[in-house]
Structure formats: C-alpha cells, structure tokens
Image (cartoon, rainbow, N blue to C red):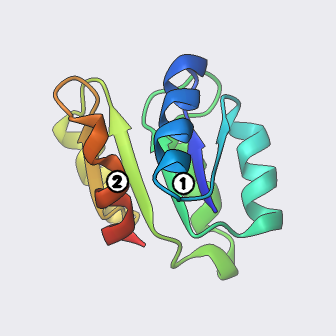
Amino acid sequence: MIVIVDDHPDICRGIELTLRLSGLPARCFCDPFKALVFVRKERPTLLLLDMMMPGMSGIELLTAVRAEPNLQGLPVVMMSACPTERAVADAARLGVGLVLSKCNFEWSQLPKLISRSV
C-alpha cells in the first residue's frame, strides 16, 4: 500500500487514482496527523509526501515516522511545488530517495518512479 499525503484534496485524489489505475494499491490523506496514525498501524510499502502542509510539514511527518523503529527503512518520495535546497537536504538526511517538483513533473510517469522506489 502506498500512502499519499497532500493537503490539496484534488492533487491527493489524482495521484491516488493514477497509481490505482496502474495497479498500485494506494490511499490518500489530506490530514498528516491521520496519515501518521494510519502509517504506524498499517506499515505501508511507500510514503509519498508533500513537503509543505499546514499543521505538520512533510519533513515533520517523516521525522515522526522515522522515530518508529519498525518504519525507519520505509521508502519515501517527497514532492513540492517549490523544493528549496534546504528542504531537499533535510529530506535526504531523513532517507528520502526522490524529491519531485509538482510544477514540472510528468504525472503519468509517477507509477514507474514509485515502482522503482519500492
């Protein structure tokens, strides 16, 4: 199960649909706090996180996930409309394998990238 976390419902559902149509099981959350509860309980195969969300950023969410011993090796892909050098460095420090820019990304390629990241 791939867990998608993005505070924009249209983006979250669009990514979920794209992955599901490619045969990848996915579930989206617009609330990072609810996503964290789910991830702790269900142990997904991959997290796809937005970097900037109200209440809890993607980096903060990932920090909480990495604090769980059984989730430390969980593959993570992050995305942002405007990924800064610092945010990308923070993501890399937390073991993020790939950071995508929402602005210039071909979303139809997402299932292939996700499959390589798992």
Task: Work out whether residue 78 or residue 55 is closer to the camera in this orientation and state it.
Answer: 78
Q: Earlier in the sequence, mark 1 or mark 2?
A: 1
Element under disc 1? helix
Question: Relative to 7, does residue 78 appear above or below in the rendering?
Answer: below
Q: Viewed as shown, does residue 13 lie left or right of 99?
A: right
Q: Amino acid at mark 1?
A: Leu
Local crowd size for mark 1, using a 10 Å CA cut-off: few (<14), some (14–19), many (≥20): many
Q: From mark 1 to mark 2, how far is it between C-alphas?
A: 8 Å
In the picture, the disc for residue 11 is none
Task: Give the number of callouts.
Answer: 2
Residue occupying image coordinates x 67% and y 80%: 69
Does residue 71 appear in the picture of this structure?
yes
Q: Viewed as shown, does residue 15 lie left or right of 65?
A: left
Task: Work out whether residue 91 or residue 7 is closer to the camera in this orientation and state it.
Answer: 7
- From the image, tell me which residue sits under label 1: 62
Image x and y of residue 50, in percent: 46, 36
Quadrant including the N terminus = bottom right
Local crowd size for mark 2, using a 10 Å CA cut-off: few (<14), some (14–19), many (≥20): many
Image x and y of residue 35, in percent: 72, 45
Image x and y of residue 54, in percent: 59, 21
Residue occupying image coordinates x 28% and y 28%: 102
Residue occupying image coordinates x 58% and y 29%: 13
- From the image, tell me which residue sits under label 2: 91
Quadrant including the C terminus = bottom left
Image x and y of residue 107, in percent: 30, 36
Question: Relative to 94, does residue 15 appear above or below in the rendering?
Answer: above
Q: Amino acid at mark 2?
A: Ala
Element under disc 2? helix
Q: Dots 1 and 2: beta carbons under 8 Å?
A: yes
